[in-house]
Amino acid sequence: MDISILQKERAKYQPELPKSIRGAVKLITGHKTESVANQKEIAELFPNTYGMPLVSFEAVKTQQEKAIINVGVILSGGQAPGGHNVISGIFDGIKKINPASRLYGFLGGPGGLVNHKYIELTDEIINKYRNTGGFDIIGSGRTKLEEKWQFDKGLEIAKKLNLNALVIIGGDDSNTNACVLAEYYAAVNAKVQVIGCPKTIDGDMKNEMIETSFGFDTATKVYSELIGNIQRDANSAKKYWHFIKLMGRSASHIGLECALKTHPNITIISEEVAAKNQTLNEIVDYIAGIVVARSNNGENFGVVLIPEGLVEFVPEMKALILELNDLFAEDSETEKEFHLLPQWQRNGWIADHLSASSSDVFRLLPPNIATELTLERDPHGNVQVSLIETEKLLGEMVKKKLTEMKKSGEYTGKFGIQFHFFGYEGRCAAPSNFDADYCYSLGFTAAMLVSEKKTGYMSSIRNLTAPAEEWIACGVPITMMINMEKRHGHMKPVIQKALVDLNGAPFKYFVSKRDEWAKSTQFVYPGPIQYFGPSEICDMITETLKLEKA
């Protein structure tokens, strides 16, 4: 296949590994764990995999020859830079353990396991994908592994291929599925281990043991380059306000990190909106106030960053969405009734089936936004927030507010708007050096966990602000991260999402600077990811990690 010059050069890059797993290793067992919440319920649901200890690896001088291990790998959910390096790390790890070990990739995500669609991943295939972006080596998918018949179909092919383990590379929901699958296979004594790897550009899959999810570093660098380009354009043309929506379904980690990198005039943080119980009108007033202040200084331009999931954090919108989720709960009578209605009757029917307060909010929304809230749910029963044009909702509301202020003489400037949504642009970029190293280490650690016969664990690399050789390779029981949440109208065990910590150092630093960035133009232009050159520009970690570990 044809490849770019960059890809050809990146193929030569050898990712770094922590010293502890470069040679012979010994497993170190730590303390037992418990779930982050709902301990009694989680323990009852996962009797075979709950309370397992933390584990880590330590280098030793010599190691006995180990048995062959055959592993199946699944890419699950949305793409994130570095997925191919996780697979490369698994491949190299199991080959180091025993050269006769084999790796199989299930095609198109979890559905490939259920439908028995797979390929054997060989040196020839793996070497074409080292240090590349995307998930195209085997493809991804969003099939949820949650039913017994799916587990049994997966077990059939695992037995046929003589698999010791499955490694599921995914986000919080995918790793929740991995935890459920591990429990089932342990309960039936299937002798098939399940290991997870933490993937999501959203940055919301982190905790004490998972310092960051892979892909976040690369994606935020790509978005920050684009934001920097727009800021430079805004500062050149001096006639537009750019409203930029950034991918990130729930948490605002991407928006916060990009703000720390680029210093835009306004960044909305969803978690702060929720904490302050801010209404849509209050958010609009805040943005309009900064537009007016900058206009009074002769600057009729600026940049606003908006998190993708904002509407779910605005109190009146959150209440509305929760009611809509219940209204459209899978296989409910109301869901069936709604889909039988002609298009022109649907919004009125919805308003009539909501509480009085939510009905009022729904009726006030622009028709296109109201319709977007009723579109088909994602596989987890949630509103597809990426389809809601929040940037246009806020932009148009600010424009209306400024028109009113102009009539009353409170505003005399000009307000031109441009809208952007940065999402897919960052999901499949060639991984930064950090993500290349981190993902390779995650995959290699997963192989070590399989070799040690662990199941229900997530591969973890810690101490990430240090050089890669000083990173710590660990295994974390997935049950440690689980709590109970309402999904599809039912309480289910899921990995707890990590939202932006309003008491954390990254947010506090942002707060200390945002008024300054709002009133004056202090844009930073990060430029593209650098793969070759001085370490200080090629091996930069995220601003978030720097501040969290300072």
Image (cartoon, grey):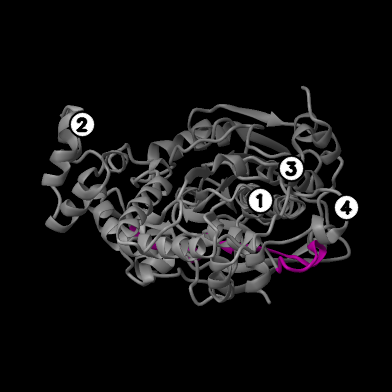
Q: Nearer the viewer, residue 76 or 78?
A: 78
Q: Label 3's element?
A: helix
In the image, 245: left or right of 41?
Answer: right
Q: Nearer the viewer, mark 1 or mark 3?
A: 1
Image: 31 above or below 64: below
1 or 3: tag closer to the N-terminus = 3
Q: Could you classify mark 2 by the number of other residues whose Cα lies within 10 Å: few (under 14), some (14-19), or many (20 or more)?
A: few
The amino acid type, in three-letter code, at marker 1 is Arg
Q: Could you classify mark 3 by the number of other residues whose Cα lies within 10 Å: few (under 14), some (14-19), or many (20 or more)?
A: many
The amino acid type, in three-letter code, at marker 2 is His
How far apart are the alpha carbons under marks 2 and 4? 57 Å
Q: Label 4's element?
A: loop
Q: On the image, numbered disc 2 is attached to which residue?
A: 339
Q: On the image, numbered disc 3 is attached to which residue?
A: 88
Residue 79 placement (x, y as % from top left)? 58, 41
Q: Does the rendering let one see residue 46?
A: yes
Q: Which residues are magenta?
A: 463-485
Q: Does the rendering let one see residue 460?
A: no
Q: Label 1's element?
A: helix
The amino acid type, in three-letter code, at marker 3 is Ser
Q: Please tell me the numbered disc located at residue 533.
A: 4
